[in-house]
């Protein structure tokens, strides 16, 4: 009991010492220091598991100061940086963990380095570390972390590069991409107005989500400046469509008069909360303003689970959206639902396994004629993270096998929110931009003037 009290006292005192003197003269670790460090390490791991990554990172840095010769704080600092998409820092601290004790370091460090090299597109080094993970880790953890799948992705990526194709996409300018996460761009029919989603510090309410400690989503609008050839007048002050929670613009009809957005206010202290992520609709008035968002009229679509990212055919009668309502058996799947009256939707049907997998599918885009479905998936073989795929509608609920769009569109990081504007001969997608040791999600434009659909099996 006395030892426990001593450790607790030292934990408390270490906070003041660490913040006041980041470079203590005596860096040796005695038994009490190590004991305190282990207690602090467990607290950091708890925060990390809860998704409070930034708080966990601070905790692990304090552990590093208390016990600088141990591999453990470096390993967990690397895990935090990876979770924050700071891949350069994840690589640095992962290698430092090995250098501290190569014989006794947790073999999961090789999985960490493998996926870090993977995301940095250093594919050969990723393969080397994934193979070490397969050699040294337990079969249970190998399966849990899907290491063989990650290795297969690297091999697939190398095969894509050998074809000689290069990325076709161009990053939008600093007026849209700011260093925060921006994604989900979509255009009005004339291509002159853009809506997109971002997690910036000027989000309505200026609050962060307590779960991932990042700012809530807001919907932003920008106008095309023909003279300067840029998107400008960017704002999230758009009538009444942004809440203090998550708001994402998902679809706008061909007449620019009706739109669907995805809203999640479950983490707010408010009486009016969504059941999960729900689909709302808004209308554009003759006064040039969007109406107050209202939940879509259907007793089937908005469940207590995640429901969002809708895409609708040009006639307005068929909607595709994402849901994790079968989360006990699968991850997010793509569903289709038909209108049963002018204002009401019927019961959703999950798409076949030629589209959906046991892993995650997200951000569907159906072409206006309903023939082709573009979507992102982690379950079909890709280059890493989410890749963009396309499948053809054969009718009666049947789809061709999904085809990967290849390295003209996809990277080793997640690529999502694909929108194809056939008449404008352009597409938009969201992907990871790595700058230095950090990264963010940005919006890219793709020239589709010479695009042709792939051959389907």
Image (cartoon, rainbow, N blue to C red):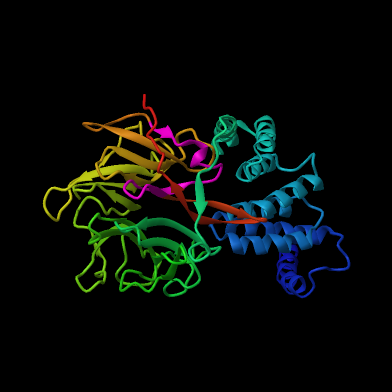
Could you tell me residue 200's position as x and y percent?
Answer: 49, 67
- Pick whichever, 89 or 20, lies toward us: 89
Residue 326: in sight, yes or no?
no
* Picture quadrant where residue 142 is located: top right
Return the residue found at the far left.
341
Q: Is residue 119 above or below residue 284?
A: above
Return the residue found at the far top.
457
Left or right for 279, reference 214? left
Residue depicted at 57% across the width and 53% down the height:
433
In the rendered view of the protein, which quadrant contains the C terminus?
A: top left
Count of numbered labels shown in the rendering: 0
In the rendered view of the protein, which quadrant contains the N terminus?
A: bottom right
Could you tell me residue 147's position as x and y percent?
Answer: 59, 35
Residue depicted at 39% across the width and 31% down the height:
454
Magenta stretch contains residue 265: no
Residue depicted at 34% across the width and 61% down the height:
263
Residue 421: in sight, yes or no?
yes
Q: Is residue 338 above or below residue 357?
A: below
Could you tell me residue 179's position as x and y percent?
Answer: 56, 63
Left or right for 439, reference 381? right
Magenta stretch contains residue 414: yes
Left or right for 399, reference 446? left
- Pick whichever, 289 or 336, lies toward us: 289
- Magenta range: 402-427
Return the residue found at the far front.
227
Could you tell me residue 27's position as x and y percent?
Answer: 86, 62
* Picture quadrant where residue 125 is located: top right
């Amino acid at each position: 009991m006395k030892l426990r009290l001593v450790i607790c006292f030292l934990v408390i005192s270490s906070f003041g010492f660490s913040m006041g003197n980041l470079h203590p003269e005596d860096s040796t670790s005695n038994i009490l220091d190590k004991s305190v460090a282990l207690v602090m390490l467990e607290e950091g791991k708890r925060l990390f598991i809860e998704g409070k990554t930034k708080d966990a990172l601070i905790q692990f840095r304090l552990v590093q100061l208390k016990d600088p010769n141990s591999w453990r704080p470096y390993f967990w600092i690397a895990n935090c940086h990876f979770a924050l998409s700071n891949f350069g820092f994840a690589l640095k601290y992962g290698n430092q963990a090995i250098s501290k004790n190569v014989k006794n370091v947790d073999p999961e460090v090789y999985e960490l380095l493998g996926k870090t090299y993977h995301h940095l597109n250093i594919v050969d080094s990723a393969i080397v570390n994934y193979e070490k993970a397969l050699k040294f880790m337990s079969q249970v953890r190998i399966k849990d972390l899907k290491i063989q799948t990650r290795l297969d992705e690297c091999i697939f990526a190398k095969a894509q590069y050998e074809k000689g194709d290069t990325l076709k996409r161009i990053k939008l300018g600093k007026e849209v991409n700011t260093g925060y996460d921006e994604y989900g761009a979509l255009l009005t029919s004339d291509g002159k107005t853009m809506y997109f989603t971002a997690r910036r510090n000027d989000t309505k309410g200026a609050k962060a989500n307590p779960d991932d400690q990042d700012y809530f989503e807001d919907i932003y609008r920008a106008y095309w400046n023909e003279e300067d050839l840029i998107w400008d007048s960017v704002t999230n002050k758009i009538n009444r469509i942004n809440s203090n929670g998550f708001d994402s613009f998902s679809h706008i009809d061909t007449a620019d008069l009706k739109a669907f957005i995805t809203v999640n206010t479950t983490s707010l202290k408010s009486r009016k909360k969504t059941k999960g992520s729900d689909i709302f609709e808004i209308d554009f008035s003759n006064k040039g303003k969007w109406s107050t968002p209202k939940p879509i009229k259907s007793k089937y679509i908005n469940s207590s689970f995640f429901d969002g990212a809708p895409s609708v055919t040009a006639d307005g009668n068929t909607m595709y959206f994402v849901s994790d309502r079968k989360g006990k058996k699968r991850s997010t799947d793509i569903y289709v639902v038909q209108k049963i009256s002018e204002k009401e939707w019927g019961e959703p049907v999950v798409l076949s396994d030629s589209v959906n997998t046991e892993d995650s599918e997200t951000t569907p885009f159906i072409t206006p004629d309903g023939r082709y479905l573009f979507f992102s998936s982690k379950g079909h073989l890709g280059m890493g993270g989410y890749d963009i795929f396309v499948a053809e509608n054969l009718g009666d609920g049947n789809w061709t096998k999904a085809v990967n769009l290849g390295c003209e569109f996809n990277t080793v990081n997640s690529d999502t929110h694909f929108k194809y504007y056939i008449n404008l001969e352009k597409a938009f997608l969201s992907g990871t931009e790595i700058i230095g040791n950090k990264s963010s999600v940005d919006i890219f434009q793709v020239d589709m003037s010479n695009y042709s659909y792939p051959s389907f099996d």
